[in-house]
Image: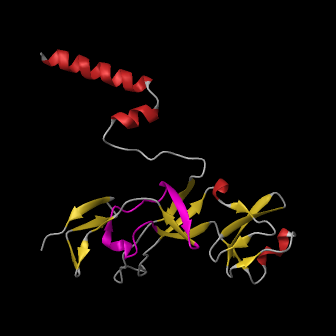
Amino acid sequence: MSISDKARRFDQAAMRERLQGPDMIQKNKAVRYPQKTDSSIFAQVTQTLQRADVLADPPVEERRKYRIRLSEEAVEDWAAGVSYEVGTVVKILAEGEYAYFECLVAHTSNNDDATTANTGLWEPVEDDIEAGVLGFTGNLLETIPWFQVGDLVEVVSKSGEWLIKGTVTRTEKDGKYSLVWDQDKKRAMAVFK
């Protein structure tokens, strides 16, 4: 078989894939892409991780978690008669704009007046919420890759904590790194000693 025949067969296979739906393509490929469901919650990364730099002027503080902004559809409206867990974020429509609140004490809401949601049970929340990564409990600074500001990520709330659905790999053991994330170049780089 000549090289042009191989190229033609590849082109024909690519054309067939374009005509198939994404579900069919996924069944035929080794790489699996996440499927969006109606219950998917998305957020945008507004602040990424940061290593401390005491020599910088002014000094840079370490950030071990991401900050995310939930899409408006991701946050449920506050409602009476609902059992809320600590860390649950709700929204309340007031004067045409949404205000966001985080639950401070586990409780069942018992008042149908949404303006009372900011009592001692709730704390106003700015748009940004702290988030970790699902399935990873260590120091995220010791992982690669890092999600970048502006990235759209799928998130989940577990036990009142928001977690990014993603895969990170730990690259540090006993204080020694094999790879580190270079935030300036936005890529993993090997560490040589």
Task: Identify the residue at horizontal 82%, vertical 57% (top origin).
Answer: 96
Task: Identify the residue at horizontal 65%, vertical 71% (top origin).
Answer: 88
Q: Is residue 123 magenta?
A: no
> Tag count in the figure?
0
Q: Quadrant of residue 29?
A: top left
- Residue 101 rendering spot, x and y as whole percentages: 70, 71
Q: Is residue 73 left or right of residue 27?
A: right
Task: Identify the residue at horizontal 19%, vertical 20% (top origin).
Answer: 6
Instruction: Please determine whether, in this image, residue 125 is positioned above or below residue 37.
Output: below
- Residue 3 rendering spot, x and y as whole percentages: 14, 19
Instruction: Please determine whether, in this image, residue 120 is positioned above or below residue 96.
Output: below
Task: Identify the residue at horizontal 60%, vertical 52% (top origin).
Answer: 39
Bounds of the magenta segment:
133-160
From the viewer's side, name the closer residue of 124 and 38: 38
Q: Is residue 120 left or right of residue 11?
A: right
- Residue 20 rendering spot, x and y as whole percentages: 44, 26
